[in-house]
Structures are given as C-alpha cells and as structure tokens.
Amino acid sequence: MSLYLLIGLILGAAAGLAVGRSIFAKGKGISRGLQTEIDKYQRELDELKVKLSEAKSEIKTAEIEAKATSKEILSDARIKANELQTQVEKDAARVEEKEKLLDQKVKEVERQNEVLKREETEVTALKAELKDAQTQHRTALEKVAKLTTEEAKTELSSELEKEFSGYFAGQVKLIREKMEEEVEEKAKDLMAQAMQRYASEVATESTATVVQLPTDDVKGKIIGKEGRNINAFEMATGVDVIIDDTPGVIVLSGYDLARRYVAKLSMEKLIQDGRIQPARIEEIVGKMKEQVGKMMLEFGKRATEELGIVGYPQDLLKIIGRLRFRTSYGQNVLKHSVEMAGMGRILAEEIGADPSIVTEGCLLHDIGKALDHEVAGTHVEIGVEICKRYKIRPEVIHCVAAHHEDIPMATPEAFVVAAADAISGARPGARRESVQDYFKRLKDLEEVAKSFEGVHRAFAISAGREVRVFVDTSRIDDLAQQKLAKDIAKKIENELTYPGVIKVNVIRDRRVEEMAK
C-alpha cells in the first residue's frame, strides 16, 4: 500500500513540474522566487524517481521470494495429500476385511438359527409324543385301578389327611402359636404405647338433650294453644319435644345431633325472648341453622389445625365439621376420627409408615357418614367419592376405601388406619348399644356358629367379644377343628356387624369312661 502511495506522489510531482515549466515558458517575466520553487520540485522529483526505482527492485525481490515460498507450500501439500491417500487406502482395506469377517459371522449365526429351529421342532415333537404317552399311560392305569385321575387324587388326599391329620394339626398349632406369640407381643407393645401417649375423653353421646327452664309456667307457652307451638317446633327442627312432670326441664329427643343442637339453641333463644309462636319459631330455627353451619366450619378447622393438616377447602372442612353432630354406637364420629389420627400417627412412626397419610386417612375414614342419610351408598363409598371430589391424595383415598376391608389393603398405612379404628372403637367406654341390640348380636353370633356341621353347642361370652364352640369329637378331628375355627370366623366377618374383634374358640373335648366292678 505504501509503495502505491509513493508512486502516486511521484506522478503527482511530475505533473506539477510540467505545469510549472509550461507557465514559465509562457511568462518570461516570472520572479526568481518562483524559479526557486520549481528547482525544489525538480529535486523532489529526482528523489522520488530514485525511490521508485528502489520500490521496483523490492517488488521484484518480493515476487521472487513469493514464487519460492509458493513452490515449497505446494510441495508440502502434495506430500501430505500422498500420505492422506495412503492412509485412506489402508482404512479402506481394513474396512473391507471387517466386512468380510462380519459376513462370515452372519452366515454362521444363520446356520446356528437353522440348527436351533430343527432342534426346536424335534423337541416339540418329543413333547407331543411324551404327552401322548402320558395320556396312554394314565388311561391304562385308570383301567387297571378302575378309578379316574380326579377320583384317585381325592382318595389319596383323603387317606393322607386321615393318616397325617394329627401330625399336620400339631405342626400348624405350633407354628400358629409361635407366630401369634411374637406378633401379639409386638402388637400389644405398639398399641400400649399409642394408647398411653394419646389420652382422650371416654364419654359417649346420648340421643336426648335436656333444656333447663326458668319456671314450669314456660311449659304452657311451649305447648301453645291446642299444641300448635310444640307442633310447629317439631316440624321446623325435626326432633321430638318431651314435656313431662319433671320440674324445670324439657327433653329434646332425636338421633340427629345437628338437629338436636339446632333445636336446643332455638328453644333456649325462644325461652329467653318469651315470644313463642309459630312464625317466631320458624324465624329463630332458621337463624340457628345458619349459626350451626358456621359452627360446623369452625369444628372442621379446629380438627385439621389440631392434627397439623393444611390446604383443605372450606367445603370439605364444613363436611368434616358435620361429623361433630354424628354418632356411631354413641361415639362422636369427629372425636373418634381425631382420636384415631393421634394414635395412628404414633403407630405409623413406630413401624416406619408415612404419618401424614395415616393422619389424613384416620380423619377422613368416616367422612361419608356426614352425608350418608342424604346420598345413596355405604359410608365408605360416599367417603371415597368425597375425597376424589376434593382431590385428596390417592394413598389417603385407599386408606378410606380399605378401612372396613371392602377392598384389599395394599399399603402399611391402610393397615394402620384399620388398626387405629379398631382400637378407638373397642376401648372401654367408647361405644354403647341398646339392650335389644346387645342380645340380638349375641344370638346372631351363636346362630352363625351353630350353622356349621359337627357343632354341638355354641355360647357367646365376654359381651360378644368371644364365642365358644363345642364340637362332636366323633365327626371333627384335629385338622378339621382348625379349619372349622377359620370358617366360623370368616362367616362372622362377612355376615355380622360388630365393634372390635371377636375371638372364635373351638373346643373338642373327648372323654372316655369305664366302670370298674
């Protein structure tokens, strides 16, 4: 670039000098100063010519060097190209050799496959031949023995059962006793810890509520003219009002705790207000129902806060709170569920199950009872639908669905929920039932036991917690005794409804008497 610039300067200077000379020729009267400038330009032009000559020389030298360098680069490139061509030829030969080996292996594999197919065909034929031979052999044996295969199996099984029934029964008894001893000790220890660490009230709910009166004169106002006030109250609340000679009180009777509580609040409000008439009764009852609805939401929030459960929508909390006004055998369902959750969490922590799943499963296991009188289906089915509607975890839903063994229990958490339910329902003072129901349950237990062949007598004892079955020793042996106990227990589980656990005790007592004369 500098070389071209230099050439441009020289050419420019030459042009300037030519112009100067032309001007000088035309005007002879030019001053000496201008002549000096012209001489200066001439000197610079000479110097530029010298530099131009040097530049041309450098250009020639650079061209010579560039030609030499390009020859060297071209030579190196040719050498490298030859080396690369040689390497490519070697790689191509290697690949070709591998392809030949691969073709040989493929042919060998195909040959082995053909051999295997032939052998497989031979094995299939041998199996068919062996099966035909077995069939012919079995047919020949059946002709000789004059028994079919099934008859022979039945007869052999019967003979083995008769011959070894005592031995098998003894072994089963020993194994069962050992397992029961180990499991029972561990279960007792866990349950004792859970019950000891969680203590709750044991009072049961009743079906009647007592309302205190300031004076007996109020009874007349409650009844009203020709009983219109009491009839309007019973129609609005859905409970029975019992007014007797007992001084200072009236009794509100009904199985629905929510209705009884609404009736109690309404009656107290009416007594305090003093205006007891049908229109006022309907107004007060409507307000109390709204108040009880708010109380249900509050009960649900308290239960979840106590158990450390968060994230439930208000509608679900309200349904949970409704359990506060629901009883089972006199046991308040919400208190029962919270109690279960406390003990279930402890059991889960002891055995390594998930405490959060067990806690939610215990709280929601009877959620269907809050709506069982409004929706068709069992409380388990209703509870599962409620949980699905409010997006409860599938693990918790499984605990709800399996706590009465309507479906098989598939997780440790489901077993813990069922165990906590049994503990809470069976503890002393938790539940109670009427005398008629009690005697009916005992009678049903005895009838189920007596329905089996070989049973001589059956007695339900320990408030229905145990049934003792006496069998005929001539018809029931040791092995049949074990089977009979299981069959009776299974039938009780399938046909009867009962709290807690029922022990089936089959007794086979053989006595031999002789007279000495």
Image (spheres, rainbow, N blue to C red):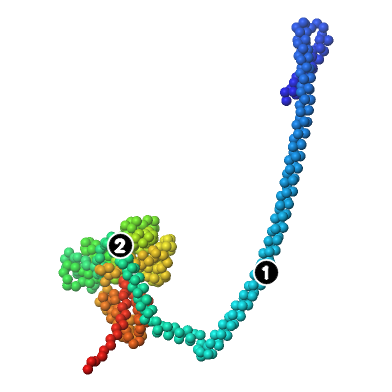
Q: Nearer the viewer, mark 2 or mark 1?
A: 1
The residue depicted at 48 percent of the width and 86 percent of the height is 152
In front: 16, or 348? 348
Number of residues whose C-alpha sits closer than 10 Å to that of mark 1, classed few (under 14), some (14–19) or many (20 or more): few
Report, in whole angstroms, how far the alpha carbon at label 2 lies from the one at label 1: 69 Å
- When asked about the image quadrant of residue 192, the answer is bottom left
The amino acid type found where label 1 is placed reads Glu
Which residue is the site of mark 1?
114
Is 64 or 417 nearer to us in this picture?
64
| Residue that badge 2 annotates | 194
Residue at 35 percent across and 84 percent down: it is: 476
Task: Name the residue type under label 2.
Answer: Ala
In the rendered view, tell whether residue 415 sits above or below residue 496: above
Q: How many marks?
A: 2
Q: Quadrant of the N terminus?
A: top right
Compared across the picture, whether 326 is left or right of 102 comes to left
Residue 20 located left or right of residue 246: right
